[in-house]
């Protein structure tokens, strides 16, 4: 009875937020810039602290989407969407942001995969998620219009890391958890999420030319790094090292300075100290990793290849959890498979996409993610002499880090990480827009000339 009451209350709160909260927040945002900023911050915050409900939920299914999920992040995004529409005459709107065509192709091939799906509803769950992610991307791209937005986004990133770090400290030292997960469903999700934000903060600390509150930012950076270490995620930690190395390389490629050398030295000492404290647990995590788990990863990867080879459009979006088990024969090579088997997800996002939607769609997906990576590389040169160069350096390391981790983990399709990836893509596209805008306005303000 209590569970039914709580379930009904949850839906009541949701619809109240949708039909009352969204209009009120929009009106307040239009009238008060501070409220608008708070709502935009919540767009970022709720990608970490997910508050959502699932319609037609299938929580026991081993898939990437378990229902028609709608969360607080979607509601606050809707508010900012109306704000963007309201100010379209002043700042304009681009209906098809850069990279959208590739995303549309990715969506189309995912839709076509339903011809082979056993359960259309499961595919619809994932298609709904993809629509929401593009909407989130579109709103952020059209909302970010100038350098002040980039400054505020940086503050928002620091507050999100602060929130995650405090949760991790609580889980580690009060609750005594071995694998700290922060607000995320799994430690791998947390590390992948922190990969981008911590890389940006790292680049910010090293490359920001104007004076900053260095103790605060070093504290935020330490929280991010400490949270990654406390996750004891093997793939995540290795990928994080790669991401950090890329940030260091491109930071020093832009020129040496006493600030960069001293900060790098301090961070190296602090990092060694944190690693030394956690060394025993990390070693245990790597040494005692079960061989059976590694072997199963390989066998599931082979099953994914079988699916992709068998069907041009894959076995059906979000249908992996069905097709990897009997009566289908893709997992016949896995010893011990029975009629009651429930095999796990394949532990690489790339083979999962190929298995569910075909090799062609995997190519489209790779084109999509590397389109934004190389567009960011282009931004790296355009912003080289500016005070916002750090964004491009941080994104360079963060994106490559999560692309690497995604070869070992499937979590990029988890809601938190998918939202953040689309936010990163929107930021890259928006920075190109800002650079072009200011390049046409050179000389109007000191800040504009500083961009060029």
Image (cartoon, helix red, strand yellow):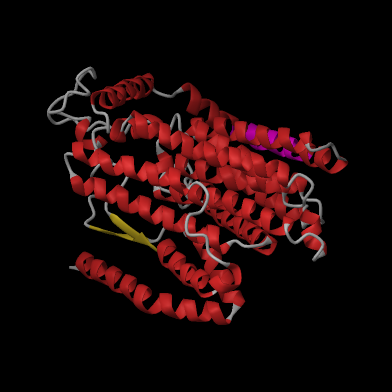
How far across and down, in percent of the image, does residue 396 sit?
Answer: 62, 39
Up-down: is 27 above or below 120? below
How far across and down, in percent of the image, does residue 400 sit?
Answer: 57, 35
Residue at point 32%, 57% (across, down): 69
Up-down: is 86 above or below 65? below
The front one of 372 and 279 is 372
Question: Dividing the picture into quarters, in which one does residue 376 lie?
Answer: top right
Kindly give the residue lying farthest to the front in the view shown. 440
| Stretch in magenta | 266-278
Question: Dividing the picture into quarters, in which one does residue 107 lie?
Answer: top left
Q: Main secondary structure of the magenta part?
A: helix
The question of residue 61 being in magenta is answered with no
Residue at point 31%, 49% (across, down): 127
Residue at point 50%, 62% (across, down): 43
How far across and down, in percent of the image, does residue 98 sit?
Answer: 52, 49
Is residue 269 shown left or right of residue 29? Answer: right
The question of residue 267 being in magenta is answered with yes
Is residue 31 shown left or right of residue 105? Answer: right
Residue at point 61%, 76% (across, down): 33
How far across and down, in percent of the image, does residue 61 sit?
Answer: 23, 43
Up-down: is 15 above or below 339? below
Query: What is the number of callouts on the image?
Result: 0
The front one of 314 and 292 is 314
Residue 230 seen anywhere in this rendered image of the structure: no
Residue 370 seen anywhere in this rendered image of the structure: yes
For the N terminus, the image quarter is: bottom left
The front one of 342 and 320 is 320
Is residue 99 shown left or right of residue 341? Answer: right
């Amino acid at each position: 009875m209590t569970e039914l009451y709580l379930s009904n209350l949850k839906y009541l709160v949701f619809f109240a937020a949708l039909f009352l909260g969204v209009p009120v927040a929009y009106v307040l945002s239009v009238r008060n810039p501070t409220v608008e900023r708070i709502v935009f911050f919540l767009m970022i915050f709720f990608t970490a602290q997910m508050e959502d409900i699932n319609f037609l939920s299938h929580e026991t299914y081993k898939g990437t989407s378990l229902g028609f999920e709608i969360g607080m992040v979607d509601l606050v995004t809707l508010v900012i969407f109306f704000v963007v529409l309201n100010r379209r005459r002043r700042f304009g709107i681009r209906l098809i942001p850069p990279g959208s065509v590739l995303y549309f192709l990715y969506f189309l091939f995912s839709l076509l995969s339903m011809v082979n799906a056993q359960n259309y509803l499961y595919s619809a769950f994932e298609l709904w998620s993809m629509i929401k992610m593009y909407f989130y991307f579109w709103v952020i791209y059209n909302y970010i219009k100038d350098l002040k937005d980039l400054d505020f986004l940086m503050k928002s990133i620091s507050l999100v890391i602060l929130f995650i770090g405090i949760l991790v400290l609580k889980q580690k030292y009060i609750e005594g958890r071995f694998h700290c997960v922060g607000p995320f469903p799994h430690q791998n999700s947390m590390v992948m999420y922190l990969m981008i934000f911590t890389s940006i903060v790292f680049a910010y600390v090293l490359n920001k030319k104007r004076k900053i509150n260095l103790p605060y930012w070093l504290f935020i950076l330490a929280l991010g790094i400490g949270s990654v270490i406390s996750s004891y995620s093997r793939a995540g930690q290795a990928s994080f090292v790669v991401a950090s190395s890329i940030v260091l390389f491109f930071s020093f490629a832009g020129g040496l300075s006493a600030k960069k050398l001293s900060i790098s030295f301090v961070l190296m000492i602090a990092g060694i100290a944190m690693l030394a404290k956690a060394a025993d647990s990390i070693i245990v995590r790597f040494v005692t990793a079960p061989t059976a788990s590694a072997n199963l990863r390989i066998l599931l990867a082979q099953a994914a290849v079988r699916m992709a080879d068998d069907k041009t459009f894959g076995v059906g979006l979000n249908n992996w959890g069905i097709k990897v088990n009997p009566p289908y024969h893709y997992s016949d090579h896995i010893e011990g498979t029975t009629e009651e088997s429930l095999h796990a997800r394949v532990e690489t996002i790339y083979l999962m996409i190929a298995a569910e939607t075909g090799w062609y769609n995997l190519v489209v997906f790779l084109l999509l993610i590397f389109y934004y990576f190389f567009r960011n590389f282009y931004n790296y040169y355009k912003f080289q002499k500016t005070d916002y160069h750090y964004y491009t350096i941080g994104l360079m390391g963060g994106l490559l880090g999560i692309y690497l981790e995604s070869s070992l983990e499937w979590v990029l399709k988890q809601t938190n990480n998918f939202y953040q990836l689309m936010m990163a893509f929107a930021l890259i596209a928006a920075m190109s827009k800002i650079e072009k805008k200011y390049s046409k306005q050179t000389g109007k303000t000191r800040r504009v000339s500083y961009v060029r």
